[in-house]
Image (cartoon, grey):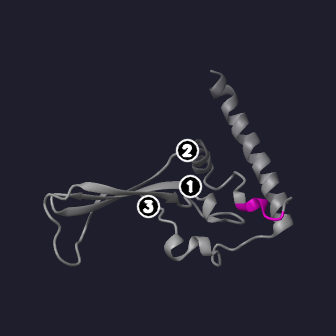
Amino acid sequence: SYAEVFGDVVKRGVKFFCDRVSGVLGSLGGKESSNTNIHLHGGYAPVRKEVHEIDCELLEGALPESLTGAYLRNGPNAAMEPEGRYRIFDGDGMVHAVRFRDGKVSFSNRYVLTKRLEVELSHGRPVFIRLADCHGLS
């Protein structure tokens, strides 16, 4: 098929283009260390491990057996170590779920598997321009 014949060529072309653009943008704005980036620490620190239905221990009291439902949070979560600049709006999407059922609590999380994330995971590193890479360009 067309995708089988040209898929690898397109992937290599995208990687080449992104490497060149990333290099140019890096020379314009300099590099930023993930060790000092506030968007990658504390409450913003990425949770890279996906888990499913991990039981949570109640630290105090008890939940009513009749309490049934879920709290969902969708937000940014860098799937891999960013190269260059990074802002919270650049994170890959992750959905976190806290479930209440039968007097127990469990936690699950999953990345939102976008085409962009699929390509970057196949390359083993970020390859697309991020919002933060546009710093200073106007």
83 relative to 26 in the view: left or right: left
- The vertical placement of 11 against 91, above or below, is above
Nearest the eye: 15 or 59: 59
Q: Which mark is residue 50?
A: none
Mark 2 vs mark 3, CA separation in Å: 17 Å
The residue wearing badge 3 is: 49
Residue at image x 71%, y 66%?
85
* Marks 2 and 1 close (CB-CB < 8 Å): yes
Q: Does residue 52 appear anywhere in the picture?
A: no
Crowding around mark 3 (Cα neighbors within 10 Å: few <14, some 14 to 19, many 20+) is few
Query: What's the residue type where badge 3 is placed?
Result: Lys
The residue located at (81%, 53%) in the rendering is 21
* Residue 122 percent coordinates (x, y): 59, 47
| Range of magenta residues | 132-136
Q: Which kind of residue does numbered mark 1 sit on?
A: Asp
Q: Secondary structure at mark 3?
A: loop
Residue contact between numbered discs 2 and 3, judged by CB atoms under 8 Å? no
Residue 123 x/y as whole percent: 63, 49
- Which amino acid type is shown beneath numbered disc 2? Thr
Looking at the image, residue 119 sits to the left or right of residue 44; the answer is: right
Q: Name which residue lies at 52% across and 54% down.
A: 93
Is-magenta flag for residue 135?
Answer: yes
> Label 2 neighbourhood size at 10 Å, few (<14), some (14-19), many (20+)?
few
Quarter of the image where one finds residue 126:
bottom right
- Residue that badge 2 annotates: 114
**Quadrant into which the C terminus falls:** bottom right
Q: Nearer the viewer, mark 3 or mark 1?
A: 1
How far apart are the two marked residues, 3 and 1, measured between alpha carbons?
13 Å
Residue at x-position 73% and y-position 41%: 12
